[in-house]
Amino acid sequence: MVEMSNQQPFQAKSNKNTLTRLFILLVVLLIVVILVLVFLVVKPLGSKEPVWQAVFLTNGQTYFGRVTKVNRNFLLLEDVHYLQTQEVPAQEEGAQPTQQLTLVKLGGEMHAPESKMLISLSQVLFVEDLRPDSQIVQAIKNQEQAQPTQSTPSVQPNQ
C-alpha cells in the first residue's frame, strides 16, 4: 500500500508535465500557422512595384493586369491590357503580309470601358505572375510613359 501512495503523486506530476508539453506544442503550432498565413496572404511591405499577371481564359483570350480581388465566383483584374493582332501589308509586291502583335490598354475602345474587368472564375484556366523583365511588362511600362496613347507599337514573340 505504501508503494501505491508513492505512485499517485508521480502520475499526477507526469500528467501535469504532459499537459504542459501539449500546451507548449499547441502554442508553437499556432504561431507557425499564423506566420505561414501572414507570409502567404499578406504582400511584403517592401514591394513597391505592382505585380503584373496574365489571366488565361477558357475561350483562348489572355488579359494582362493586376488581380486585386478574388472571391468564390469572380476575380477583379485592374489596369487591363490585351494583345491584338494586326496585319501589316507587304513592303514588296507579291510578298505575303505579316502579322504584328500590339498591346492594347482596355479603355480606348468605342464603348469606352473602364480599365478593369470582373471575370467569372469558371472562365479562368490559370493566372501567372509576370516577371518585371517580361516583354509584356516592359511594353506596359513603355505605354504608361507614353500616355495618353492607348497602344504600344508591338510586342515581338520569342522565335
Image (cartoon, rainbow, N blue to C red):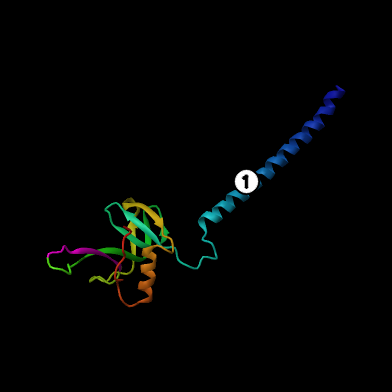
Q: Place residue 61 in its image quadrant.
A: bottom left
Position in image of residue 31 (x %, y %): 62, 50
Q: Nearer the viewer, residue 138 or 151?
A: 138
Q: Could you tell me which residue is drawn at 51 percent across and 61 percent down?
A: 43
Residue furthest to the left: 94
Quick check: 4 left or right of 96? right
Q: Position of residue 115 (x, y in %)?
A: 33, 68
Report the residue marked by disc 1: 29
Residue 101 part of the magenta-drawn span:
yes
Magenta segment's dominant SS is strand
66 horizontally vs 84: left or right: right
Quarter residue 138 falls in:
bottom left
Q: Is residue 67 above or below residue 28?
A: below
Residue at image location 75% in from the left, 38% down from the top: 17
Q: Secondary structure at mark 1?
A: helix
Q: Residue at x 38, y 76 (%)?
A: 145
Which contiguous range is marked in magenta?
A: 94-104
Which quadrant: the N terminus?
top right
